[in-house]
Amino acid sequence: MNALRNVTKSPLLVSLIIGVIISLGIIALRNSGALESIELIAYDWTLRSLPQISSQESPVVLIKVTEDDISDLGQWPLTDASVARALEMLLRCRPRVIGLDIYRDMPIPPGTSELERILLGNENIITVMKFGDKEEHGILPIAALRETERVGFNDILVDPGGIVRRGLLFLDDGENTFYSFALRVALLYLKEEGIRPQPDASNPQFLRLGKTTIPPFGHDEGAYVESDARGYQFLLDFRGARLPFRSFALASLISDRVPAEALKDKVVLIGTATESVKDFFYTPYSRGLHFSQQITGIELHGYIISQLLRFALKGSRPISAQGNWCEGLWIVIWGIMGGVIGSRVRSPWSFSILASAGILILVLSGYLALMNSWWIPLIPPVMAWLFSSTVVTAYMSNKEKRERIFLMQLFSKHVSREVAETIWNEREQFLDGGRLRSQKLIVTVIFTDLKGFTAVSEKLDPQTLINWLNTYLEAMARLVIEHGGVVDDYIGDGLKADFGVPLPRTSEAEIAKDALSAVNCALAMEREMSRLNSVWHRENLPTACMRIGIFTGPVVAGSLGSSERLKFTTIGDTINVASRLENFDKDHCDSDPIENPCRILIGDSTLHYLDNRFRTEKVGDVSLRGKEQRIAVFRLFGRPNGYPDSNGQEGRL
């Protein structure tokens, strides 16, 4: 319990602990997969925000089989003769690579032999097959090219939700390794550039193209949790997705209306772009208000090929994540920063501005990181930042509310509003674990008591007596508060007041000011007592006289009692002396309820701070009850004639 109490004393330490706990909870939530979908949405949004690369600069050109082409040719699938005619026309334009993204697992005569002749006679043509999975059957490649390196699978990885974010390079069936269609086309294009696939020097299992190593996608990469990571996968960047590839319709190619220079030394992909064939896919760019939300299969392969060529020729880096430890540390850092902000800021406007600034920094960090091919998490640190700052703010506000209630319970009824606010603003100076930190202070103490109260109590019925006494005590307490003092205690028909608490006085001037306030308060009590006696006399109620003792000196101030019932008070020899001064020679106290209702005695330590501003008369060096050392005692009569007091009233002789 003591250790826990010590921890809660430090707002910064509490904020750090809360920030770490919330961050770890968010990391656990993330590892469960609960945040995967929203993280991928944030990833897509960031990816769409990146600067674009013009697809017109890519060596990829598309030949699209449209609905009009199918209508003109009169059938689907295209006959082998139609495909052969298209390949023949392409070869005349001397492209570097031709990618045929049309299945030919069985002959579709006429023209089968002609198609086989063209395929076997031209090494720069790559055809497709489908690897398949448990849900879809595979499709064999054209018979003429089976068992050759001129076949690649065109399977596409689709995430839950229907969006393509990853590309495939290799798949295996447990015995054989298969190349993807895009990789086959890219490698054939790069062959003339003198670039061949190589194992990475530091990790031979990683593929290297030119100067770029492509690390395989892991099943927990980035926001993904236990995803299907079979084969050799990598993240697609879709740079240029808003700027389409240069393309031509199949009919334009067959009718020789495509300029040869548009295809020379290019990567030419032939595939469908028809609603009837349904070869369409969603990408991270499939959001917004534009009409077409999907791209065709050959466009998707074109982006994959372009990205592989940028890896090899321009040294572009593949998108990769930082690993679970780095990402976890990033989340914890933001959780801690959110906690620190929550412990420091109380203004709703300031909190809103700082919270928004933190989110903006996170978004900008994620954007800049992805520009440099680093995928850092966005949603988890945003959650850690907001949750930590909110929870810590709520905790600190609740803690401050409890402390304020505690302080106000101790002081609000006994001090002025200004003093109470000062106490609250300076609370860290003297609050210690929910209790007041004990302090040694120099204080001026007032004790008051009524002369002959026993006789008064015998004349009145209980309710009238209580009303009479409350009128007196409320008036005296009000004067204490008005003069900047603290009502410490009510003692029967008297009260104890402290001037100089609870905030420590650090200079002689401040101590003198407290002594002056106490004496002015005592004189105000004398005037108020005279007024009350006049009122009581008119109402046929008993009148009374009052004794006041004032002494200045060191005390120990703090809260006493149990946790359920605490009381702020001062203790020490100074308190005893002030009490003895009030009680000194009480049986021989000469006073008149109207003209002279109070006897005010002060000690020499208080007189020291009054600077001859008041008329006093030395009673003598007396021995007070319970005190061995004699004390110089003075009776206070008021201010010199014409010398105004704190209320602007002139003193009287």
Image (tube, rainbow, N blue to C red):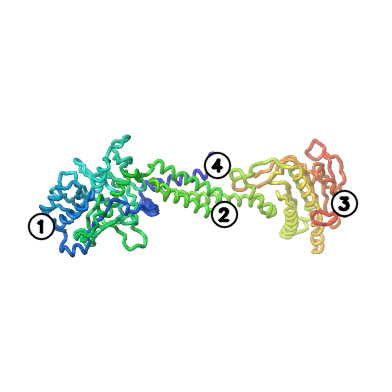
Foreground residue among 86 and 366: 86
Instruction: Report which quarter residue 466 is drawn in.
Output: bottom right
For marks 4 and 1 on the same chain, the one whose residue lies earlier in the sequence: 4
For the view shown, which residue lies furthest in the top direction? 202
Residue 458 screen position, x and y as percent: 77, 56
**Numbered disc in front, either 1 or 2:** 1
Image-based side of 505 in relation to 400, left or right: right
Residue drawn at x 31%, y 42% as measured from the top left = 214
Where residue 640 is drawn, which disc sits there?
3
> How far apart are the alpha carbons under marks 2 and 4?
27 Å
Q: Which residue is mark 4?
A: 5
> Of helix, strand and loop, which one carries label 1?
loop
For marks 1 and 2 on the same chain, the one whose residue lies earlier in the sequence: 1
For badge 4, the amino acid type reads Arg
For marks 3 and 2 on the same chain, the one whose residue lies earlier in the sequence: 2
Q: Which residue is mark 1?
A: 110
Q: Which residue is mark 2?
A: 347
Residue 185 screen position, x and y as percent: 24, 47
> How far apart are the alpha carbons under marks 1 and 3?
131 Å
For badge 3, the amino acid type reads Pro
Residue drawn at x 28%, y 53% as measured from the top left = 300
> How far apart are the alpha carbons under marks 3 and 2?
51 Å
So how many labels did they put on this image?
Answer: 4
Can residue 445 be seen at all in this image of the molecule?
Answer: yes
For marks 2 and 4 on the same chain, the one whose residue lies earlier in the sequence: 4
For marks 1 and 3 on the same chain, the one whose residue lies earlier in the sequence: 1
Look at the numbered discs 2 and 4 and tell me whether their residues touch, using CB distance below 8 Å: no
Residue 95 lies, with reference to residue 293, above or below; the image says: above
> Of helix, strand and loop, which one carries label 2?
loop
For badge 2, the amino acid type reads Ser
> How far apart are the alpha carbons under marks 4 and 1?
89 Å
